[in-house]
């Protein structure tokens, strides 16, 4: 599981650098309303940080649709 969480953090870091290339971790942290230390944990995929903070980052990056798909079940044609 740790590997998947670190991938989450890597994706967050990549998205920050793509959409806000001038932002340091500290500046981006201010944008989403967290401390630099908390944001640093997020880029490591640390789930001790509340999911609301990850969602705030996803919203700012315009990626919340993917976030909202986390627990979406795929239904088949045979389901009622």
Image (cartoon, rainbow, N blue to C red):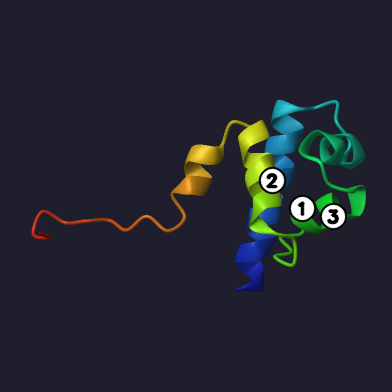
Q: Which residue is mark 2?
A: 12
Could you say which quadrant of the image residue 24 lies in?
Answer: top right
User: Label 3 vs label 2: CA separation?
Assistant: 13 Å
Q: Earlier in the sequence, mark 3 or mark 2?
A: 2
Q: Is residue 16 left or right of residue 58?
A: right
Residue at 84% x, 55% y is 38
Instruction: Look at mark 1 in the image and give the residue it sits on.
Output: 43
Which numbered mark, 3 or 2, is in the foreground of this view? Answer: 3
- Would you say 72 lies left or right of 78 here? right
Q: For the residues labelled 3 and 1, say whether their Cβ atoms are less than 8 Å apart.
A: no
Helix, strand or loop for disc 1: helix
Provide residue 63's location: percent of width, then percent of height.
56, 36
Q: Earlier in the sequence, mark 2 or mark 1?
A: 2
Disc 3 secondary structure class: helix
Tag 2 and tag 1, C-beta contact below 8 Å? yes
Disc 1 crowd rating (10 Å Cα; few below 14, some 14-19, many 20+) is: many
Up the image or down, 75 lies above or below 16; here it is below
Between the residue at mark 3 and the residue at mark 1, the CA separation in whole angstroms equals: 9 Å
Q: Is residue 11 left or right of residue 34?
A: left
Q: Quadrant of residue 21?
A: top right
């Amino acid at each position: 599981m740790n590997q998947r969480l670190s991938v989450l953090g890597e994706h967050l870091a990549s998205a920050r650098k793509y959409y806000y290339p001038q932002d340091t971790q500290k500046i981006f942290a201010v944008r989403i309303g967290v401390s630099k230390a908390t944001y640093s944990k997020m880029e490591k995929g640390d789930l001790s940080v509340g999911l609301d903070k990850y969602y705030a980052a996803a919203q700012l990056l315009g990626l919340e649709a993917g976030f909202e798909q986390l627990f979406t079940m795929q239904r088949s044609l045979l389901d009622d």
